[in-house]
Every structure is written in structure tokens, then in C-alpha cells.
Amino acid sequence: MNLRNWTSNSWAVLNSIPKFHRESQEIISVLGIQWNTNTDTLSVKSMPFEGDITPQNVLKQSAQFYDLCGWFTPITIRSKLLLQQLHELQLTWGQLLPENLALEWKNIQTNLRQAASHQIQRYLQNLESPSSQLQLHTFADALRAAHACVTYLHIQEENTENRIIICKSLCSTDCTSNQT
């Protein structure tokens, strides 16, 4: 995407922008998040996973899945915890993972691929609707192995709906527990 170009999900806005300043692509990517302007959905960019299952490749492939808003924290925290386990084992960068950890990494890879195909609605709600009841909920949890916090919007109209706004996690520095 050219930094001088503009895009919008609104045809009224797009029609007010000269054609030479409009972005021609339907899907644009910024900071690892892809925005489909036609469907007004967001998704994370998926990178192909390849190579031997070594600590170096696990780190490289984990870093390629950039989940800025934390929508897929339940998956990404597992890769962080796996990296901690690999550090504890003191494996060299090129050494193959033990079979049980290689299997865990393959499961994480499968989940990351599935997450990349998930579409998230960008538009949350018409906040000016008088019939809407909106509540912002935040939960935090901490275990020995990791901490996480999630904030979501609870929308109550005819139907109740919950939308994750942001989620963050971090691994504890104490890696001696396998609890997650």
C-alpha cells in the first residue's frame, strides 16, 4: 500500500477521493493485520511454516504470526511457553526438538494456520443506538506459567453478543511449572 493512497469501506468516502489517490487493492495489510475493505473484516497474516523443527525455527515461525491485538492469545501463549521449555532444555539453535515437543509444536502450527483464516468484524456496534446496552468487561488471570488479560465488549440488544477488543499475555519468568 502506497502511503499516499487512501481506502475506506464506505463508497461515499471513496467517491470523494480522486482515483489516483485511492488504494487499488481490496485487502490491505498494516502491522501484520489485514483489512478487507469490502467485507470490513480484519485477520492476521499467515506465513508458511517450513523447515526442521528446531528451536531457531520455532522462534522464527512464532514471531512471524504477529497478533497485535491479542485476538489469538490462547494459541500464541502456547508457543511462548514452548519456547521457555526449549530454553530450559538448553538445546542448540540447530538441534531437533524431542518428539513430544515437536508434536506440541505441530499442534500449535495447526492452530496458527486455522487462526489466520478467522475473520474478525472491524465494526463493533452502532454506539448511538438507544436500544443497545453496552458493557466493557475485563478479566485477568495468572498462573505460575503465564498471565493474561482480556477486554471485551458485551452488547445486549435483541441478541447478546460479545466481541474481544484486546487481549495481552506474558509468560512468567519462573519456567519450572508446566501449568498453563
Image (cartoon, helix red, strand yellow):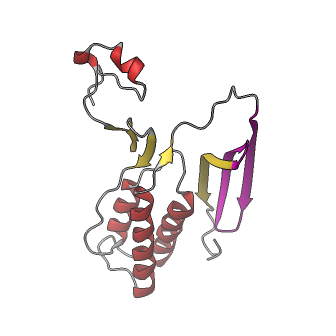
Question: Residue drawn 33% across and 73% down?
Answer: 54
Question: Residue drawn 40% across and 70% down?
Answer: 110
Q: Can residue 1 be seen in this view?
A: yes
144 magenta-colored: yes
Bounds of the magenta span?
A: 131-160
Residue 142 coordinates in the image, percent (x, y): 72, 61
Looking at the image, residue 153 sits to the left or right of residue 76; the answer is right
> In front here: 157 or 22?
157
Residue 17 coordinates in the image, percent (x, y): 33, 14
Above or below: residue 153 compared with residue 76: above
Residue 51 coordinates in the image, percent (x, y): 25, 71
Question: Residue drawn 35% across and 55% down?
Answer: 46
Q: In which quarter of the image is the C terminus?
A: bottom right
Total number of numbered discs in the rendering: 0
Q: Quadrant of the N terminus?
A: top left
Above or below: residue 166 compared with residue 83: above
User: Magenta region, mostly helix, strand or loop?
Assistant: strand
> In front here: 64 or 6?
6
